[in-house]
């Protein structure tokens, strides 16, 4: 972490004394990973007597859209990543109402699991997306959890179906591009349908899609065409996956409401939500 901090300051042409605020991801996430960042932030902020602010990782993803665009309220946010699949309604800065979440597996997690069963390297999402563009939806897989009248998601059944299908057949007998296309079509249709349901209940000025899976080309194309009557915002690819910029911009807006303190005792909150 020391080397990373030194390199970051060097590339930014800043000294520690020129920093106004130290922000760090406090959760959710794996506690070990969170503690590495939190301990480094505590020490750095204490050493240079800078205010310190813990930031919700999910808030960071939401505000990744603000890096290149101006969020217009009210807005609907679909957050899709390796650990999360959530719908949020935003009425103002930091005024966030959770509408729906996954009751089991997150979308990105399922992508990686399917990729592993197809002997594709990690991370599997980008490769499945590429292969899906070469295939057709010939397997006509189920669109899970659409009969339920809510805004939650469930992808464990779809994952099990794909895993069992691959296990029962020899990989060389499977048309992998078609299987990837069928899987991706199922996932994207579910995300699209649940988003449409949310939009019937909440009037918004923008639809924002963030998280690692927001870099998926199939998802981007589907949402841009399906919601052409609405301003649809996707961050640039570099801001979809986890990065410090999203935590920094989230901290900027959070600090307007909850001022950072000079108490250097932040702890990890692995189950942090809203």
Image (spheres, rainbow, N blue to C red):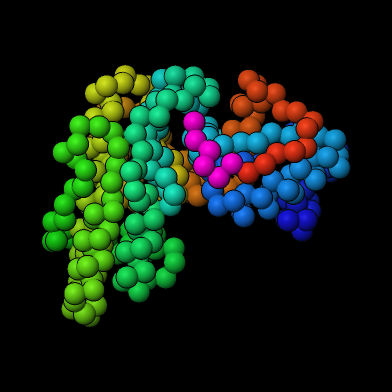
Q: In the rendered view, would you say 10 is above or below 147? A: below
Examine the rendering and report whether any part of residue 173 can be seen: yes
Q: In the rendered view of the protein, which quadrant contains the N terminus? A: bottom right
Q: Residue at x 79, y 31 (%)?
A: 262
Quarter location, residue 42: top right
The answer to whether residue 222 is seen in the rendering is no
How many marks can you see?
0
- Please state which of residues 202 and 105 is positioned toward the viewer in this rendering: 105
- Magenta span of residues: 269-274
Assess whether residue 156 is covered by the magenta stretch. Answer: no
Residue 48 is left or right of residue 33, and the answer is right
Q: Nearer the viewer, residue 182 or 103?
A: 103
Q: Confirm whether the magenta stretch covers residue 273.
A: yes
Image coordinates for residue 31, horizontal then vertical, percent = 59, 51
Nearer to me, 176 or 220 = 176
User: Quarter of the image holding residue 268?
Assistant: top right
Please tell me which residue is depicted at 75% across the width and 28% down the height of the picture. 261
**Is 203 situated above or below 156?**
above
Q: Main secondary structure of the magenta part?
A: loop
Indicate the position of residue 119 as horizontal and vertical percent values: 35, 74
Q: Is residue 66 above or below residue 31?
A: above
Q: Residue at x 58, y 48 (%)?
A: 243
Q: Is residue 121 left or right of residue 265?
A: left
Horizontal and vertical percent position of residue 182: 20, 58
Q: Position of residue 174 (x, y in %)?
A: 19, 74
The residue lying at 28 percent from left, 53 percent from top is 156
């Amino acid at each position: 972490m020391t080397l990373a901090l030194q390199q970051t300051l060097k590339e930014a042409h800043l000294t520690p004394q020129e920093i106004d605020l130290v922000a760090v991801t406090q959760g959710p996430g794996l506690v070990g990973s969170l503690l590495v960042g939190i301990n480094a932030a505590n020490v750095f902020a204490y050493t240079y007597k800078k205010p310190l602010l813990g930031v919700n990782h999910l808030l960071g993803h939401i505000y990744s859209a603000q890096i290149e665009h101006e969020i217009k309220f009210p807005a609907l946010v679909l957050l899709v990543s390796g650990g999360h699949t959530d719908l949020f309604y935003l009425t103002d800065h930091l005024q966030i109402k959770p509408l729906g979440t996954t009751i089991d597996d997150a979308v990105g997690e399922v992508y990686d699991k399917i990729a592993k069963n197809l002997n594709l390297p990690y991370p599997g999402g980008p490769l499945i997306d590429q292969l899906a563009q070469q295939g057709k939806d010939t397997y006509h897989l189920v669109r899970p959890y659409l009969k339920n009248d809510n805004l939650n998601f469930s992808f464990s059944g779809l994952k099990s179906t794909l895993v069992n299908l691959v296990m029962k057949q020899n990989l060389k007998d499977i048309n992998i591009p078609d299987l990837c296309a069928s899987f991706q079509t199922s996932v994207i249709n579910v995300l699209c349908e649940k988003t449409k349901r949310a939009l019937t209940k909440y009037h918004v000025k923008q639809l924002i899609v963030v998280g690692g899976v927001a870099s998926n080309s199939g998802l981007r194309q589907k949402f841009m065409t399906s919601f052409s009557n609405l301003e649809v915002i996707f961050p640039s690819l570099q801001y979809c996956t986890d990065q410090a910029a999203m935590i920094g911009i989230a901290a900027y807006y959070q600090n307007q409401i909850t001022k950072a303190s000079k108490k250097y005792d932040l702890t990890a909150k692995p189950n942090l939500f809203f």
